[in-house]
Image: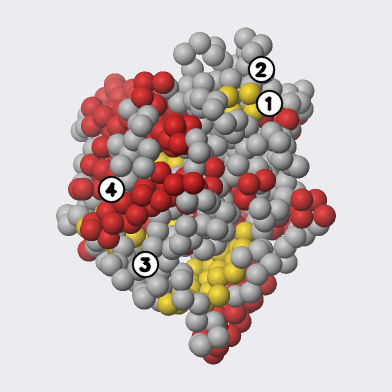
Amino acid sequence: MTTRPNIILILADDMGYSDLGCYGSEIRTPNLDRLAASGLRFSQMYNSARCCPSRASLLTGLNPHQTGVGHMMDALGPPSYQGNLNENCATVAEVLRSGGYSTYMSGKWHVGGRYDLLDDSDWERQKGDAGHPIPTQRGFDRFYGIVAGSANYFFPRLLMEDDRFIELDPSGYYFTDAITDNAVKMLDEHAANNAAARESGAADGQDGQEDNQDKNFFLHVTYTAPHWPLHAHEEDIARYEGAYRDGWDALRTNRHEELKASGILSDKWQISPRNASAHAWRQERDKDWEDLKMATYAAMIDRMDQGIGRILDKVRELGAEDNTLVMFLSDNGGCAEFLAEDTDRPVPSQYASPNPDGTPVKMGNIPGQRPGPADTFMSYDLPWANASNSPFRLFKRWTHEGGISTPFIISWPNRIKQPGIVHEPTHISDIAATCIDAAGARYPAELNGSPITPIEGVSFMDAIDSGAWKRDLPIYWEHEGSRAVRIDNWKLVAEVGGDWELYDMHEDRTELNNLVESNAPQAAEMTALYDQWADRCGVHPWPLSPAARMMSLRNPHNHYV
């Protein structure tokens, strides 16, 4: 049997660092916990702070700006901000397919340009053009999912199967379940294709070549859970209703204590103060409603884990468990976005389209309104996001630890002999490099007639084999003017429009003691390195234009893009 692994790469959406059971959470995630118990957990895996940039980096092994996705889906002028994957990057699916893998994707794409959710007359015209590449054009044999960034879980728009937009029967539909259903279906079809190839080979007199004929698979599962809106099955919500009556302050503390007890985080790292925009739980007047919002968020993660369990069951049923490399992470930290109908920046109209039965969607975090059903559209808001990111500062979109830190789990029974925790700082671009390394595939210098930017990610196969590795290269970030660089124990970081801050991450990973003035030489050295990287990778000062400025409001309560 081939020693190359099958690969399943699973991505959650807007899930915080401490939202899994095996990362300190009270949320029930038994399937991911089981993978962690027999595999590896990384304590310092970093994403790229936001959905589009993280996905671009995960898929290509490059920095987001190098792929054309320096911001989000909008074309903002420079090539590094064109809003979709460019022709000078190779996706991991393209690389693995050229190496003999079958490639499948189920879930959210979000690296293929901007679509108007309300103007379906333009969808077909745009789909697959230079500004709107779709997964089947970028290396995936099969695709099911959405090409946009978020969706009504009970009736998603911009839903595709392979290369065509599809209508759905909304009766009993729930997007998280559909992503799982289609991932399992793709595995079944893969097994059937392998069986057919073996049978064909035998008919041609090639008995004994079964192992050589079996193709490996690469399956990319990209859940939208737990991204807003707060939509969940009522039976899943019921498991958690009442569980959060002690509030976000107690939840942050409890999760931090669990993370320290498990060895993921050091005892010397103090929890960051409650975010200044969050009031103390004792001051909250509507505790039942707030409890219910967090319960619905937990239910969405619970259902995702149930789906992951179904995928793993299928792999086991196919006899492929031991030689399947499974990876799981989130695209950014917990999301502090507040969906309100009475702010000066209302919820975008494209999300307010009615349900198929004509019932209107009640937009916004309306006090007392029960989240979960299809006719609501809510978020869990900043104080709970602060708990999701415990013990770190800030949120999705920032390059402080709360925005870029993700749980990361690896399972590969044939290869991982010593379960444990890997503490080396690691970047999301390293995942593509590791998948390519594990598969024995070759990263191309040219693809479809275009030169390909050399991969930036570094394989961490040493961590898989020995539980430890060393990333010798710095890690860089920039998103909407939030920027950072990590070199060994040092991290230089700045908020949008803010001054540089310097932290010793060995002593202070929660970023409480700014050393930028007391260690000016270190800060100056790292600033110079950042400037060189930004120039090399096409990073432009933010905002790029008045339109971009509108998308870069610093108040997290009014940020929806």
Q: Quick one: label 3 or label 4, which is nearer the N terminus?
A: 4
Label 3 and label 4: CA atoms lie apart by: 20 Å
Which quadrant holds the C terminus? top right
Q: Quadrant of residue 458?
A: bottom left
Q: Give the vertical position of 521 relative to 402 (above or below).
A: below
Locate residue 124, reporting x and y percent.
72, 26
Q: Is disc 2 in contact with disc 1, using a CB cutoff of under 8 Å?
A: yes
Q: Which residue is rendered at x = 40% and y = 58% of the image? A: 391
Q: Identify the residue under disc 1.
A: 352
Q: Quick one: label 2 or label 1, which is nearer the N terminus?
A: 1
Q: Identify the residue under disc 2.
A: 360
Where disc 4 sits, the SS reads helix
**Residue 270 badge:** 3
Q: Identify the residue under disc 4.
A: 22
Q: Quick one: label 2 or label 3, which is nearer the N terminus?
A: 3
Locate residue 285, reporting x and y percent.
50, 38
